[in-house]
Image (spheres, rainbow, N blue to C red):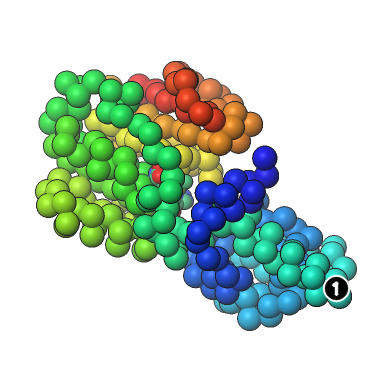
Amino acid sequence: MKYSTYLRELFSDTNLDIEDLLLLESFQIKYLPKRVPQKEFATLLRAHPIIHRFLIKKEPSIQSFLDKILMENKPIHDQDTINDHCNEVVWEIGELIVYNKFPEAYNSKIKFTWKIEDILSTNLLKDKTIADVGAGSGMLSLLLSPYVKTVYAFEPLVSFRKFIRNEVSVKRIKNIYTLEGYLESIPLPDDTLNYLFTSNAIGWNFEQEQKEIERVVKPGGQAIHLMRAFDKDAASPYHDQLLKWNYEFYQFKAEGYKAKYFKTF
Ligand SMILES: C[S@@+](CC[C@H](N)C(=O)[O-])C[C@H]1O[C@@H](n2cnc3c(N)ncnc32)[C@H](O)[C@@H]1O
């Protein structure tokens, strides 16, 4: 299944517009070359010069990619095709837009089926300092918080940090600290964490991410990466990369793909 088709079905009652690309943060714009269909994106840039200009202003490093795809793809003149191309781009990166525009829709629609017993024995979590990096709407942080001393929930997006802080306040949770942070640059001193968790938040820059994980996890501590995907093919690049970094893994029986990868340092 195409990713855009999966997203259209998942967020079928959510309205995404082309102008929503104006909500993207710089680090998300850097991901576009790997995420957008190029021919369709070239059409969108020609049809929406404001977006073209915005992307370059917000993240100047994107310019060479935009120049390249505009050179390689001829202008389209048929208005229906232009509309189809623009919609295809919006839905191919629909998840990024939903994060920024409707964090509550992400939180309610995503099938986060992890239970604490799938992840780790609660005895091992007692009194521990942990991080959830790429925390999104905080579903994993909230699941882990009753069992540990401290949770650092690191998330680059303002919209999600706001969402988590609100949940933490409404639910009167005392041990989740929500901070800006990237997996390849975690604002913690060396050897701080007993456990570092991610849930569907790995693989932007594997080498740098692994170095950073090794730096912040205490000797004897663990990194645990949870992965769920709409099918096995969607998960396989991450699977292969994690095995290359000597992770062990356990696959759960589930709709689509669901697995836990773990490594002791
Ligand atoms: C697929 S979502 C997963 C969110 C959440 N962990 C979950 O399981 O629902 C990926 C998250 O990683 C964040 N992210 C993107 N780039 C990141 C990076 N370089 N380091 C850490 N998090 C990142 C995104 O903003 C988004 O919240």
Q: Which of the two residues, 163 or 216, is positioned nearer the viewer here?
A: 163
Determine the residue positioned at 16% across, 36% down. Answer: 146
**Horizontal arrangement in the rendering, residue 22 relative to residue 2 (left or right):** left
8 vs 130: above or below: below
Callout count:
1
Q: Which of the two residues, 251 or 15, is positioned nearer the viewer here?
A: 15
Q: In the rendering, at what x and y percent does residue 169 appear?
A: 16, 57
132 vs 182: above or below: above
Q: In the rendering, at what x and y percent does residue 40 appear?
A: 75, 62
54 vs 149: above or below: below
To which quarter of the image does residue 217 belong?
Answer: top left
Q: Is residue 254 visible?
A: yes
**Horizontal arrangement in the rendering, residue 27 relative to residue 192 (left or right):** right
Determine the residue positioned at 38% across, 50% down. Answer: 108
| Location of the N terminus (image quadrant) | top right
Classify 10 Å Cα crowding around label 1: few (below 14), some (14-19), many (20 and above): few
| Location of the C terminus (image quadrant) | top left
Q: In the rendering, at what x and y percent does residue 151 appear?
A: 22, 42
User: Which residue occupies the extreme front position in the image?
Assistant: 13
Q: In the rendering, at what x and y percent does residue 259 appear?
A: 46, 25
Q: Is residue 238 visible?
A: no
To which quarter of the image does residue 221 belong?
Answer: top left
Going by the numbered disc 1, the residue's amino acid type is Asp
Determine the residue positioned at 87% across, 68% down. Answer: 74
Q: Which secondary structure lies at badge 1? A: loop
Q: Which of the two residues, 252 or 213, is positioned nearer the viewer here?
A: 252
Q: Which of the two residues, 197 or 255, is positioned nearer the viewer here?
A: 255
**Horizontal arrangement in the rendering, residue 226 relative to residue 66 (left or right):** left
Q: Which residue is mark 1?
A: 78
